[in-house]
Image (cartoon, rainbow, N blue to C red):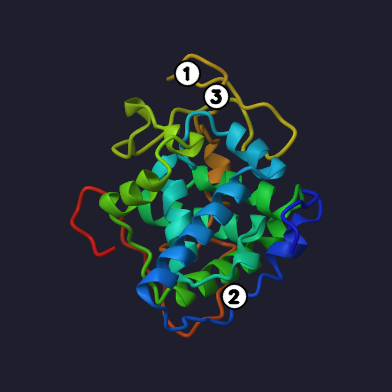
Amino acid sequence: MSTAQDPTTAHMAATHVNLGGRSCPGRSGESLLSRQHQELQAFLRLLEDNFLQQFLSQDPCFQISDKYLLAMVLVYFQRAHLQLSEYTQSNFFLALYLANDMEEDLEDPKCEIFPWALSEDWRPWVADFLRQRNKLWARMDFRAMVSRQCCEEVMAKVPSHWAWARERRPHHGRAQRSCPEAGVSLPRGPGLSPPQCSLCGQPPRCRHYHAQFLSECPSPAAGGPFLAVDLPWALTFSRAKRDHQLVH
């Protein structure tokens, strides 16, 4: 699948992601290191995709795509044993959404991912997007918790890469439980400039949502209005804190 997708048709790719299979061939230590290097290079190339560059540029406060969340995306790709051909925009958005599920206290900021992954007419496709997220989660054997140490080991392989400079400012930390209201309807999606961030004092967006929109953003734990999964078990997500001792 080409990584260059028109945003108006991106939802078609997201609804046809092949996440049903799983491949984990036996590998020697040398071949494993070679494979991990190939995966890292494929991931870094994916980050250079023009559409993903636009998406990342619309999150200058790094609230849904800071360096740790981006490192988690690569860890998820590896845990799911994705083929290099599956390092795509669609799978990037699925993994990033799952990383936000696991790490972020605020539920609504991650909804900004929907118009980028699913196009401007994103609402009818959210249920399918969440089913695809669950398939990715299952393909990872439901190992979605990632330690801070694991993320830092990923970043240490190419420490000078620009993605690892996406350091979130302290006032946008995870201790935050609510956002001040703003007179801007969100999510905004491609082609629109972000609203002023009152905390940073600059144009970057600071995830301020109208209360009327909060009910439209599905939470995997709460089962929002779009959540219509076809898996036979209840979905629950615990908030994994990077400072805890977690299994890689």
How far apart marks 2 and 1 lie (CA) works out to 40 Å
Instruction: Name the front one of labels 2 and 3.
Output: 2
Q: Secondary structure at mark 3?
A: loop
Please name the residue that numbered disc 1 is placed on: 198
Q: Position of residue 174 (x, y in %)?
A: 32, 40
Which residue does the image show at 33% across and 58% down from the upper left? 146
Q: Mark 2, residues whose alpha carbon is within 10 Å: few (<14), some, or many (≥20)?
A: some
Q: Looking at the picture, which amino acid does disc 1 mark?
A: Ser
Q: Position of residue 56 (x, y in %)?
A: 58, 37
Which residue does the image show at 46% across and 76% down from the upper left? 138
Please name the residue that numbered disc 3 is placed on: 204
Residue 130 location, quadrant: bottom right
Q: Tell me if residue 18 comes above or below residue 70 in the rendering.
A: below
Res 6 visible: yes
Instruction: Name the front one of labels 1 and 3.
Output: 3
Q: Residue furthest left?
A: 245
Q: Position of residue 191 (x, y in %)?
A: 75, 33
Please name the residue that numbered disc 2 is placed on: 19
Of residues 119 and 219, the one nearer the viewer is 119
Res 105 visible: no
Which residue does the image show at 51% across and 21% down from the upper left? 197
Q: Tell me if residue 226 comes above or below residue 232 in the rendering.
A: above
How far apart marks 2 and 3 lie (CA) works out to 34 Å
Q: Looking at the picture, which amino acid does disc 3 mark?
A: Pro
Query: For the C terminus, which image quadrant?
Result: bottom left
Labels 2 and 1: the sequence-earlier one: 2
